[in-house]
Amino acid sequence: MQALTFGGKEVIEFSTVNDPQLLHPTDAIVKITLAGICGSDLHVYHGRETGLDFGTIMGHEFTGIVEEVGNDVKKYKVGARVLSPFTTSCGECYYCRIGLTCRCEKGNLFGWMQHGHGLHGAQATYIRVPMADSTLIPLSNDLNEQKGLLLGDIFSTGYFCADNANIKPDTVHVVIGCGPVGLMTIIAAKHLGAETLFAVDIIPERLAMAKQFGSVTLNAATENVKEEILTASNGRGADSVMEVVGSDQTLKLAINLLRPGGTISSVGVHTAPNFSFSPSEAYDKNLTYKSGRCPAHHYSEKLLREEVPQRYNIENIITHQFTLREGANAYEVFDKKLDNCIKAVLLTE
Ligand SMILES: [Zn+2]
Ligand SMILES: [Zn+2]
């Protein structure tokens, strides 16, 4: 089959590799219909994560059709339309039972192979899905592939971020970063009842989409963000700040914009060894800080049940579509935000 594989720092190769095989009776093989390129794929792309095996198939966002199932797969039959969270989960361990499926004791991240262990990713024709019954989620006919793909990762992540932000009526909230996850966070925060919702970025096209999704936009390059937030909050600061970028600067900005007693909800993938604010700053703000990887299986099921993705045009953020063969170019366009790219997906045939 064809796949995009990791070839080293900023090298994505269009490769011919062996088709995946069933390794365990609980595995399924899924034929990919749509694969996404995620902001966290860029950490790998830039070589910021060390130790990923060369030849690892990239990607962890996908929808597909079940092609083959092991003997112990009960829930899915060949031909079923499915979406998948970016990690596998067993459905039975302590973490799965409490809804923290991203920390499943047997779970793995797709597109992550180290020393020959782990899972290949979804930017390929086929993918092997372990623990298929408890990992995959049916993609119902009222959901298109795009919605399904976003639900398995970034829409769930955005919703998780907003859900952790303690949104109440008559409060002031801020989303820092209007990339794909930030835009999903804005939709979720509005859904959860945020009335005064500011969105901060420096890229005009992204701010325009943030406005379309119902936020008041602030361009950090040309406007005084802190002054605007203080004005909107009787001089107190924001009740919550949702930080989706994952940089030291944005975390620093988050605590600066926050009122005492407020909440920072952070889903940006942080790789720094230390916080960019001090314990005394946290103390002085009576800070609540929530962070971590989204339990996407838990949220995907919840949001489908509540028919949330059905209600919003979340797929409007997908600005670019490429074929697998164009993978190297797709990564470059997405990474450098060329041609006003917000979100890029890959068609696998
Ligand atoms: Zn992702
Ligand atoms: Zn588990």
Image (cartoon, rainbow, N blue to C red):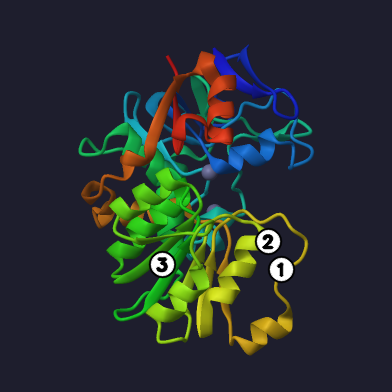
Q: Are marks 2 and 1 in contact (CB under 8 Å)?
A: yes
Horizontal side, residue 124 vs residue 77: left or right? right
Q: Say the numbered circle drawn on residue 276.
A: 1
Q: Give the CA distance from mark 3 to mark 1.
A: 24 Å
Mark 2 vs mark 1: which is more N-terminal? 2
Q: Residues within 10 Å of mark 1 (few under 14, many from 20)?
A: some
- The residue under the point 62% across, 13% down is 15
| Type of the residue with mark 3 | Asp
Q: Is residue 280 visible?
A: yes
- SS type, badge 3: helix
**Image-quarter location of ligand 2:** bottom right
- The residue under the point 26% across, 44% down is 313
Q: Is residue 298 visible?
A: no
Q: Give the CA distance from mark 2 to mark 1.
A: 5 Å
- SS type, badge 1: loop
Front-most of 166 and 3?
A: 166
Indicate yes or no: mark 2 CB to ligand 1 under 8 Å.
no
Front-most of 10 and 18?
A: 10
Q: Which residue is mark 2?
A: 248
